[in-house]
Amino acid sequence: MKICVMTLGCKVNKYESDALIYNLGLKGYDTTDKLEPADVYVINTCAVTGEAEKKSRQMIARCRKFNKDAKFFVCGCASQKNTTQFIEKGVDYVCGTAGKIKISEYIDKLAKHDKRYLRKHERVLKLPKSYEDDLFAKQSRTRAYIKIQDGCNNFCSYCIIPYLRGRSRSRAIFSIINEASKLDKNIKEIVLTGINVTDYKIDDKPSLLTLLEELDTFGKRLRLSSMEESLVDEDFVKGLKNLNNFCPHFHLSLQSGSSSVLKRMNRHYTAQQFKQSVELIRKYFPLAGITTDIIVGFPGETNEEFEETYNFIKEIGFSALHIFQYSSREGTVASKLYKDLPPEVKQQRFERLNELNKMLKSNFILKNKSGEVLIEEVEDNYYIGYTKNYIRCYIENDDKLKKKFGGDLLDRVVKVKIGKEYKEGALAYILEIED
């Protein structure tokens, strides 16, 4: 039986899909994460925006083009939010964000022609209060993602995720260390991921730095998927500086550069506090990559508030922006209290920030003269990888290079000179092999 697991949305979803693929593989099934002909499709859905939810539904139709008689199992945030939208599509089984690994049990029943898995095809479980530690993703890529936390307690007024993922809960440190110890030798970088990594705790005490210190002993590069401003203080940043393998890339969520908008968003900081956090990071990591998320067109955002955001972003000098147009999510505070802005206003503001983003990326690349690149892939005759501070580098792959440095460079760390902009990053030239 061929099983295809398709993932929409965040890296947490991707980790959970990888865990499901690994579990199914242990059972002897032929599994893939590529969209291709299969007997069973598992769709791991996303609901962070209306567009993401729409794409989750559309994925079913895309899969059916490969096999109209295939069986469909749906899980994730969009199905947690609304199972009916998938049942109406004629899928065989729907669950939510909890108990995803149980899908493998029902696929077993399907394989054995046991129709009991269809008796109740809607199995959305109650959201757990403790971390579900039944997911383990066997990874063989150059960069490994390890999930350390789930859920969120922030309840930002625009966000539906706390209602779909539940309250924040942390994975036991021994479980994380155990997974890290089993990573393949070719994996050179660990990325810690979760719904709110900032809230990682041990015995109910903030402990992200403690976890990083433990993982630092493995000798692999360490990267955080995202952070909240509240985590940044002198002790934390100084602790990161003392690590041997930390990658100084901080994805520090901003959402708006206007303090009045931040208040309506229920973000628990002001623009000035955010700026102070950035200044502290740069005190210890002058060339840190600092990326962020921005929501344009939040309900009630005035022209003046948008200009505050625009000027604040320019002043901070981020290395890159992830820009989203506000999408109203039914069930959130913002959807009930605030009137949405016209689409054309959102689009205009999005375009302005997108142009600013291009300038910020260029400025950041120009500041960096060299870096250490972990080579992850080959595309169009270029080796491609990222510096520690997250500049995507393109290194021309030719016979002279292979001869000089001894064959294939995949999964290796190289020191490079950074050149001019190219595609989503910069051209780079190898100075020496680091490993």
Image (cartoon, rainbow, N blue to C red):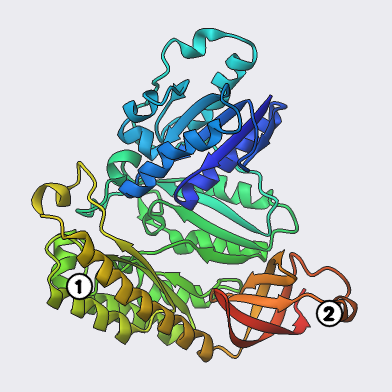
Identify which residue is drawn at 19% across, 79% down.
Answer: 308
Q: Quadrant of residue 377?
A: bottom right
Residue that mark 1 sits on:
270
Answer few, some or many: residues within 10 Å of disc 2's Cα (few below 14, many 20 plus, some between 14 and 19): some
Amino acid type, mark 1:
Thr
Identify which residue is drawn at 19% across, 46% down.
Answer: 332
- Looking at the picture, tell me which residue is in the foreground, 300 or 389: 300
Instruction: Tell me, yes or no, whether the two marked residues, 1 and 2, touch with CB atoms within 8 Å.
Output: no
Q: CA distance from mark 1 to mark 2?
A: 50 Å
Q: Which image quadrant: the C terminus?
A: bottom right
Q: Quadrant of residue 236?
A: bottom left
Residue 367: give its label.
none
Q: Earlier in the sequence, mark 1 or mark 2?
A: 1
Q: Please give left or right for residue 401 compared with residue 280 in the image.
A: right
- Expressed as whole percent of the image width and height from the top left, the position of residue 41 reads 56, 31
- Expressed as whole percent of the image width and height from the top left, the position of residue 343 reads 22, 60
Residue 401: give its label.
2
- Looking at the picture, tell me which residue is in the foreground, 329 or 14: 329
- Looking at the picture, tell me which residue is in the foreground, 180 or 287: 287
